Image: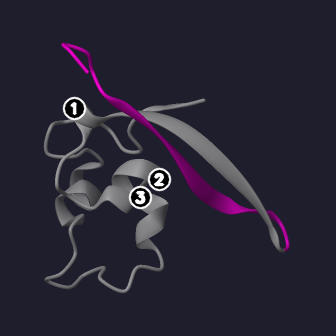
Amino acid sequence: MHGGTRTGRFKTNQANTKEGERNPTVRSIPQSQLTSECWLVQFSGLDRCDKCEFKNTNKCGGQSIRESGCNELGFKVPIGEPL
């Protein structure tokens, strides 16, 4: 790609709407807005931390995002726009 901004489309699962039923969301996420921090949180938002086995450990890649609500570049999570 020459001179353009790369954008990916990612399908994320949000909370169940009814028992056993999922409400998937597709987001357009510009790669230039992503950092090396936790991608699950950047794609889906802070709710992803609720059941994460790495939360509050030294392996957590989203500690600063949880504190500020934004990634290192200052973009509010979840990043991108729903399609």
Task: Specify the label residue 71 is tagged with.
Answer: none
**Pointer 2: residues within 10 angstroms few (<14), some, or many (20+)?**
many
Segment tinted magenta in the rendering: 1-19
Name which residue type carries label 3: Leu
Query: How far apart are labels 3 and 2 at the CA level?
Result: 7 Å
Marks 1 and 3 sit apart, C-alpha to C-alpha, by: 20 Å
Q: Nearer the viewer, mark 3 or mark 2?
A: 2
Identify the residue at horizontal 46%, vertical 74% (top origin): 50
Q: Residue 78 placed where, x, y %?
A: 41, 44
Could you tell me which secondary element the residue under label 2 belongs to? helix
Q: Is residue 10 magenta?
A: yes
Q: Nearer the viewer, mark 1 or mark 3?
A: 1
Q: CA distance from mark 1 to mark 2?
A: 17 Å
Amino acid carrying label 1: it is Ser
* Viewer-side residue, 26 vs 4: 4
Could you tell me which residue is drawn at 24 percent across and 81 percent down? 56
Residue identified by numbered label 3: 46
Q: Is residue 53 above or below residue 64?
A: below
Quadrant location of the N terminus in the rendered image: top left
Instruction: Give the residue number, with chain letter if any, for mark 1.
Output: 32
Would residue 76 appear left or right of 37 to someone viewing this image? right
Q: Position of residue 18 (x, y in %)?
A: 86, 65
Q: Quadrant of the C terminus?
A: top right
Q: Work out which residue is located at the far top of the displayed protein and give it.
A: 3
Give the residue displayed 39% in from the left and 60% down from the top.
40
Name the residue that disc number 2 marks: 44
Q: Nearer the viewer, mark 1 or mark 2?
A: 1
Of the two numbered discs 1 and 3 on the same chain, state the one appearing first in sequence: 1
**Which of disc 2 and disc 1 is earlier in sequence?**
1
Corner quadrant of residue 72: top left
Q: Give the residue type that dot 2 points to.
A: Ser
